[in-house]
Amino acid sequence: MDAVPAPARVYVTAVALAALLCLRPLPSLHAPWWAVLLLAALYAGSELVARSRLVGTCYPVLLAGAFLLPPPAAALVALPGALLSPVPRRPFGLRRVWRAAQLTLAVWAAAWVHGRLDGPDAVGEPAFPYALVPAGAGVLAFCLVLAVLDGGILALADHVPPSRAWRGLLPRSLAPIAVHGLAGLMMAVLWRSPYGPVAALLVLLPMCVAWWAFAQYHRERAAHQATIRALVQAVDIKDGYTRGHSERVGQASMMIARELGMDDERVETLRFAGILHDVGKLGVPTRLLRKDGPLTPEERRVIELHPEYGHEMVRGIRFLGEARAAVLHHHERLDGSGYPYGLAGDRIPESARVVAVADAFDAMTSTRSYSRARPVAAALEELQRCAGGQFDPRMVRALVHALGRHGWRPAVTADGPPGLPAERAPGLAGGARNSVGRGAP
């Protein structure tokens, strides 16, 4: 949404108008306004703290409002916090309006569904376990509105294809927001109990502990990302011919992993593996990486040590997991003629087989100082030709299917005019040994 297209602005305006319609009955509404103000202030304060700590939003307060108040009053609770909370990027005003309108509609829908199922009476009695039914329905309505609206903005502002814009939004949000919904229900029950609002606020204490733990996780993850970025930048500086290659191999590895049905954690690990596969080049003399002429056998042997150098560099980084094996073995070949250990078949770690295909694909579709970029179709044809000997056929098929759905934009990674010395332009089947000097497979 940095440069927001006109259709997206119209969409945000329409959502904002719908939110205003939800608030229209407020002047004639009989509601406990002190409770509305208290919840709105609590949500605004919680939102400011949560956003500054990068831990998301404070849904328990919003959902407690949905379980305690009429729909227009409950929707009003979201407005101050949404309008005052910091936003990460421009346009700041439009982002705040979008966030406020989205939450207003979601809270209104949750309160309306909750009221239709006699939720307020169940909270006030309290009538358990029936109180869980309207609360659950309200949480589902809340998640559904957020998912529908988010999908629309992804399609219009970020140009995500409609077939993908809404995919997975509801399932991903349902479980965490359901936990917030339980906390909101506990707040609402205590609020209506003899213990009153002060006791209801105590429910937020364990949520604060959870936020703190999540913030620690986020900081640790940011540190991981910074470590990886520093390593990749060092490789790019040293071997300018392949600048950007690591990130693209990470992207292709992630596409293969998703196509194979791996869970999100493994997909992220495979992305790390692709990004870091050439980190061992930091241990190779720069003159060899940038040499224009053919490599001597001795120079080639030195360069072929880069997987072992890379593994030595990353083996102490525990969060990388199986990505460390990919760094070490991504130049192994299925027929056993690769390096550094000549592993064959299933003895090659799965992560390394994924990265080998991603590495080869990007090397072929990128222009280097020693080879011209091939069209994507030609690169895939070459991968399929070498499947079973050099590459795992399953990984090749996964990449072909993934690219068929999502496409690929090959990038130019060399600054100078491409040449094509005979010693550096073998068929892909020999590329694992003959083109390693420039980061090719």
Image: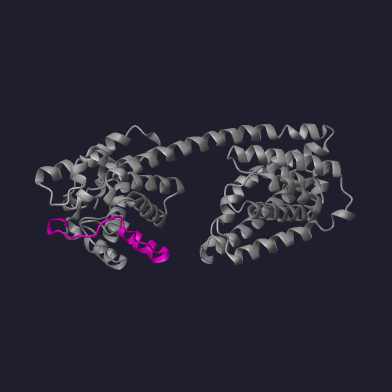
Residue at coordinates 78% horizontally, 36% vertically from top-left?
A: 190
Q: Quadrant of residue 4?
A: bottom right
Total number of numbered discs in the rendering: 0
346 sits left or right of 110 in the view = left
| The N terminus - image quarter | bottom right
Q: Is residue 87 above or below residue 159?
A: above
In this view, the residue farthest toward the front is: 416
Residue 65 in sight in this render: yes
In terms of depth relative to the viewer, which is nearer, 390 or 95?
Answer: 95
Q: Is residue 438 above or below residue 185?
A: below
* Coloring basis for residues: one colour
Residue at coordinates 54% horizontally, 56% vertically from top-left?
A: 168
Residue 206, x across and y down, in percent: 65, 32
Residue 304 in sight in this render: no
Q: Is residue 27 above or below residue 404?
A: above
280 sits left or right of 48 in the view = left
Residue at coordinates 54% horizontally, 61% vertically from top-left?
A: 165
In the image, is residue 54 part of the stretch drawn in magenta? no
In this view, the residue farthest toward the left is: 297
Give the magenta-colored segment's residue range. 396-424
Residue 132, x across and y down, in percent: 72, 46
Residue 97, x across and y down, in percent: 68, 54
In terms of depth relative to the viewer, which is nearer, 39 or 2?
Answer: 2
Q: Quadrant of residue 394?
A: bottom left
In the image, is residue 420 part of the stretch drawn in magenta? yes
278 sits left or right of 409 in the view = left
Residue 240, x across and y down, in percent: 28, 48
